[in-house]
Amino acid sequence: MTRVPVESSMMASAGYDSPARVLEIEFATGAVYRYFNVSLDVYQELLDAPSQGRFFHTRIRGVFDCYRVTDKLSAQ
């Protein structure tokens, strides 16, 4: 999945797979998570949010099922 850089101290990049409805976020720590059954609107709102970290904590974290894809240490 292709991710785009985001302007956030918490996140490095975010990407979206529309057919699968999967949101992928790479955090500043290097950890990558995939969130399931996310609408395109939520992804667009994340990208447009004045504070992407705040948006993540209020609209994504704990709302959507997710799993950790990788982290910086295991990717090396």
Image: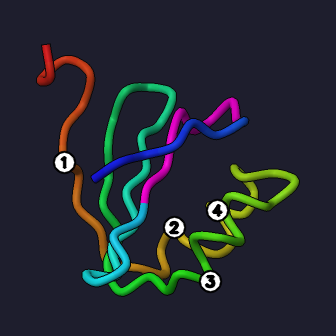
Residue at figure coordinates x 44%, y 82% from the top left: 38
Q: Can you give x and y, in whole percent of width and height, for residue 65 in the image?
A: 32, 77
For mark 1, does the 10 Å Cα neighbourhood hold few (<14), some (14 to 19), or many (20 or more) residues? Answer: some
Which residue is found at the position 37% from the left and 27% from the top? Answer: 30
Q: Position of residue 58 (x, y in %)?
A: 69, 71
Estimate the spatial distance between the alpha carbons at disc 4 and disc 3, rounded to whole Å.
Answer: 16 Å
Query: Image quarter for residue 76?
Result: top left
| Residue under pointer 4 | 57
Q: What residue type is labelled 1?
A: Val
Kind of residue indicated by mark 4: His
Number of the label disc, if any, that sits on residue 61? 2
Is 25 above or below relative to 59? above
Q: Which of 36 and 1 is in front in this view?
A: 1
Circle 1 is placed at which residue position? 69
| Amino acid identity at mark 2 | Arg
Which residues, given as a range, are shown in magenta? 8-15
Q: Which residue is drawn at 64% across and 62% down?
A: 57
- Determine the CA span between mark 1 and mark 4: 19 Å
Query: Which residue type does callout 3 highlight?
Result: Asp
Q: What element carries label 1?
A: strand
**Vertical arrangement, residue 29 with respect to residue 16, above or below:** above
Left or right of 53, for residue 33? left
The x, y position of residue 54, in whole percent, is 75, 57
